[in-house]
Image (cartoon, helix red, strand yellow):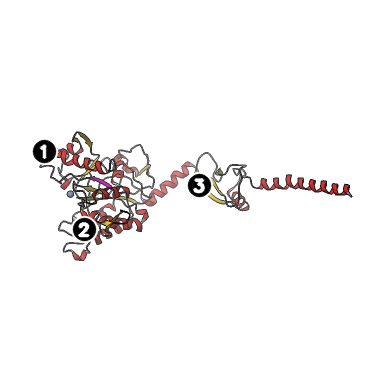
């Protein structure tokens, strides 16, 4: 009896050892990744299905593999896999020559033209009014249209967006960093004079954050930032020594702007006509604003000057070089770009004709489609606007424009 019992114990133990050694191994084997390099895509799909893996297929063009071959898998062979894991396989879908052909098809489809022109919009004040409340054309608040209604500014922003313009920073434009989606065109928004209605502060909330008027320029820009996240809303504000004319909040405003993706530039201390002042006064007008900005937002402002009235009107004027490069209070300053007043779009930063020290702007005003108003300018742009290939590291131009190319900033150039 005892012997029989021992035999049963030994038999059970043998069974247990068998289960422990054989069956678990089989389960473990089933949960190890295999090498998919010899599989077809259909076989890989089936494998992912059977193992409850979430399959993602990346496609590449390469000359190193045959079309249809799986060239990479994110989970290495013999790595443990469990239900729900992401399996990413990379499949060769063509040769580099195929890729070139495909790219050119896409460039033609979007009419990509990275030597086309770029609108740099010039705004001043935004007034919380409707167009019907003004006695001037369209959204103009004054005779020359330097001041604009909030209604018109909203319409402008809708118009640019609907016409496939996307905002970029002025400083990026100057540096040739144009990061917009394929088929879209860059646009730059600027404001001169540091008017209160550019960023009108109504007070502070309980956390000491600025409460900004929803109908001032920034209020409206922020509204569009929420409405169209892919608009990449940004603008550059050019200030005088009175900053935004809100002494209680000026410093908070500058910090808020740079923290929220906007830029601050130099519009001179007191808005002189640069043809009517001395070199010493020129140094003060430019250098003191750089000094002031550096005290409040150190190294966070842009070294760009919007020339007051567009003065001194010509780069050969004696004062011009002191705007660009001089010293004030024993501190050297260097201006990387200067903006003029009016009247049309400027060149691609990759064009022979591009001169960052004398950039043209479009006055954002209405004149029934005449004399370089918004409507006239955007109509002209239809013939020759910058259209992106969607890759900021590549300059894509028409073959016929090759001789106009300059300043490639070491980026890859493709012509078609
Ligand atoms: Zn001005």
Q: Is residue 368 left or right of residue 391?
A: left
Nearest-to-viewer mark from 2 and 3: 2
Q: Which residue is mark 3?
A: 59
| Residue 285 percent across, percent down from the top left | 16, 41
Chain part drawn in magenta: 261-275
Give the residue number, with chain letter if any, for mark 1.
278
Task: State the SS at label 2.
Answer: strand
Q: Secondary structure at mark 3?
A: strand
Question: Which corner quadrant of the image does residue 230 belong to?
Answer: bottom left
Q: In the image, residue 257 lies at what x, y percent?
A: 29, 49
Mark 1 and mark 3 lie on one chain; the one further toward the N terminus is: 3
Q: Comparing marks 1 and 2, which lies closer to the viewer?
A: 1
Q: Check disc 1 and report its element: helix, strand or loop.
A: loop
Q: Nearer the viewer, residue 312 or 302?
A: 302
Disc 1 + disc 2, Cβ < 8 Å: no
Tag 2 residue: 148
> Which residue is farthest right?
1
**How packed is label 1: few (under 14 Cα within 10 Å), some, or many (20 or more)?**
few
Q: Give the alpha-carbon distance from disc 2 to disc 3, as whole Å.
A: 49 Å
Mark 2 or mark 3: which comes first in sequence?
3
Q: Nearer the viewer, residue 83 or 71?
A: 83
Q: Give me the residue at 24% from left, 60% from top.
A: 150
Which mark sits nearer the N-terminus, 1 or 2? 2
**Residue 263 in magenta stretch:** yes
Q: Residues within 10 Å of mark 3 (few under 14, many from 20)?
A: some
Name the foreground residue: 190 vs 174.
190
* Residue at image point 28% right, 59% down: 214
Query: In the image, which disc is placed on residue 191?
Result: none
Q: Residue drawn 28% across and 57% down?
A: 219
Q: Nearer the viewer, mark 1 or mark 3?
A: 1
Task: Tell whether 108 sits left or right of 16.
Answer: left
Please say whether residue 119 is visible from this viewpoint.
Answer: no
């Amino acid at each position: 009896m005892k012997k029989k019992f021992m035999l049963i114990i030994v038999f059970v133990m043998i069974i247990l050892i068998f289960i422990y050694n054989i069956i678990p191994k089989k389960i473990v084997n089933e949960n190890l990744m295999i090498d998919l390099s010899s599989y077809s895509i259909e076989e890989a799909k089936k494998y992912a299905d059977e193992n409850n893996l979430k399959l993602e297929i990346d496609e590449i063009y390469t000359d190193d593999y045959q079309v249809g071959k799986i060239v990479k898998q994110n989970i290495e062979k013999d790595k443990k896999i469990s239900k729900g894991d992401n399996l990413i396989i990379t499949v060769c879908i063509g040769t580099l020559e195929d890729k070139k052909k495909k790219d050119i098809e896409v460039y033609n489809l979007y009419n990509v033209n990275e030597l086309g022109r770029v609108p740099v919009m010039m705004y001043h004040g935004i007034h919380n009014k409707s167009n019907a409340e003004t006695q001037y054309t369209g959204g103009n608040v004054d005779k020359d249209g330097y001041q604009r209604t909030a209604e018109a500014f909203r319409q402008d922003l809708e118009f640019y967006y609907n016409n496939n313009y996307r905002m970029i920073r002025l400083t990026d434009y100057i540096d040739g960093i144009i990061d917009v989606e394929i088929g879209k065109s860059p646009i730059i928004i600027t404001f001169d004079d540091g008017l209160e209605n550019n960023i009108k502060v109504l007070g502070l909330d309980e956390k000491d954050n600025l409460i900004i008027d929803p109908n001032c320029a920034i209020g409206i820009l922020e509204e569009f930032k929420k409405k169209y996240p892919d608009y990449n809303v940004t603008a550059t504000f050019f200030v005088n020594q009175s900053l935004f004319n809100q002494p209680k909040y000026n410093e908070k405003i500058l910090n808020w702007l740079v923290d929220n993706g906007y830029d601050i530039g130099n519009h001179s201390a007191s808005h002189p006509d640069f043809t009517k002042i001395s070199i010493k006064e020129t140094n003060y007008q430019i250098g003191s604003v750089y000094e002031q900005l550096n005290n409040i937002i150190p190294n966070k402002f842009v070294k760009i000057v919007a020339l007051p009235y567009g003065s001194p009107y010509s780069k050969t004027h004696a004062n011009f070089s002191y705007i660009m490069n001089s010293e004030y209070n024993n501190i050297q300053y260097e201006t990387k770009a200067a903006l003029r007043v009016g009247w049309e779009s400027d060149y691609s930063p990759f064009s022979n004709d591009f001169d960052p020290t004398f950039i043209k702007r479009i006055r954002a005003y209405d004149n029934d489609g005449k004399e370089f108003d918004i409507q006239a300018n955007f109509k002209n742009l239809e013939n020759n606007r910058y259209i992106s290939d969607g890759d900021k590291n590549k300059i894509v131009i028409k073959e016929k424009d090759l001789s106009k190319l300059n300043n490639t900033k070491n980026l890859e150039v493709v012509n078609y």
